[in-house]
Image (cartoon, rainbow, N blue to C red):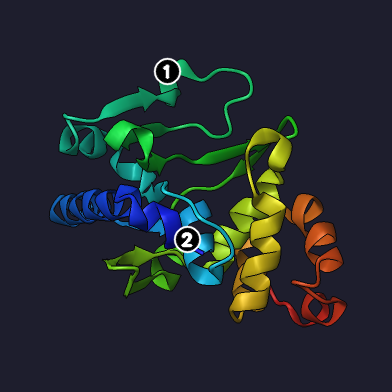
Amino acid sequence: MIGGEAAGNGELIANIQLAQEVSDRLIAADIDFCVFSGFHAALLAAHRQTPDIDFWADHTKWDQLVETFPDASILDRRITKRPGDPYDGVLITLGGGDVSVMSGTIIFSDNVSYPSPFTDLVRENRVHTTMHGLKTWYANPADTLLFKAISQRGRAQGKHDLDDIAAINNAVSIDRQYLLQRIHECHAAARTIPLLLQMGVLSEADLLQYVA
């Protein structure tokens, strides 16, 4: 679960407070964003702890992002991209790296590039709500699930992608038609559909009913 020791020692509480500040600053700067990835998965499924909070921001406002967080650690992967980096774009980290804002247009996995910008489809399907005291924009669960399905990183890499997919699928109702729309948008069918069929997230009937 999200709470437990992390909340007990104040680490998660401090990060929630920082994340709220980050959220408020993004809203004030008119930058569209949402919480996603591991923290989002943990909130949805309550299956593990993580003090890290990840934001996904509009890639068209890279320069505004940098200007909005002059006090943050900023890594501009448009300039410093290295082999093995999981995505391009700008990575902004605060609180020693426990709260981060990612703004990129590509996910790299298994030496293949998958386009993954913050599109109108993502923007229209995010949700504004409060979870664990953090009132902000959250990704559609299908977007976090898709990010995990493209990445497919395991515990050997210190990641929980497959565990998160299974937990999210068990905990919440997935909009499968939206998920397939996003898979199509990311050109990730060959990478993700076999895995999602195997894990029971998608069915053959979903594929037959899908209209691009």
Q: Give the amino acid at mark 2.
A: His
Tag on residue 40?
Answer: 2
Label 2 Cα neighbours within 10 Å, binned few <14 / some 14-19 / many ≥20:
many
- The kind of secondary structure element at disc 2 is helix
- Residue pictured at 44% horizontal, 64% vertical: 139
For the residue pair 6 and 175, the one nearer the viewer reads as 6
Residue 99 position in % (x across, y down):
34, 43
Report the front residue among 76 and 2: 2
In the image, residue 158 lies at what x, y percent? 63, 37
Q: Position of residue 39 (x, y in %)?
A: 46, 56
Q: Nearer the viewer, residue 187 or 73?
A: 73
Residue 119 seen in this snapshot: no
Give the image location of residue 120, x and y in percent.
42, 62
Q: What is the C-alpha distance between the residues marked 2 and 1?
A: 29 Å
When the figure is inspected, residue 8 is found, relative to residue 211, above or below; the finding is above
User: For this view, does 110 lie left or right of residue 1?
Assistant: right
Q: Judge from the rendering whether residue 56 lies leftward or rightward of residue 167; answer left or right.
A: left
Select label 2 or label 1 by which is in front. Answer: 2
* Disc number for residue 103: none
Q: Residue at x 33, y 50 (%)?
A: 9
Q: Which residue is mark 1?
A: 79
Q: What residue is drawn where x is 72% and y is 54%?
A: 162
Disc 1 on helix, strand or loop? Answer: helix
Q: Is residue 90 left or right of residue 28?
A: right
Q: Residue furthest left?
A: 28
Rate crowding at label 1 as few (under 14), some (14 to 19) or many (20 or more) other CA atoms within 10 Å. Answer: few
The residue nearer to you, when weighing 44 against 175, is 44
Residue type indicated by callout 1: Ile
Vertical side of 161 occupied by 68: above or below: above
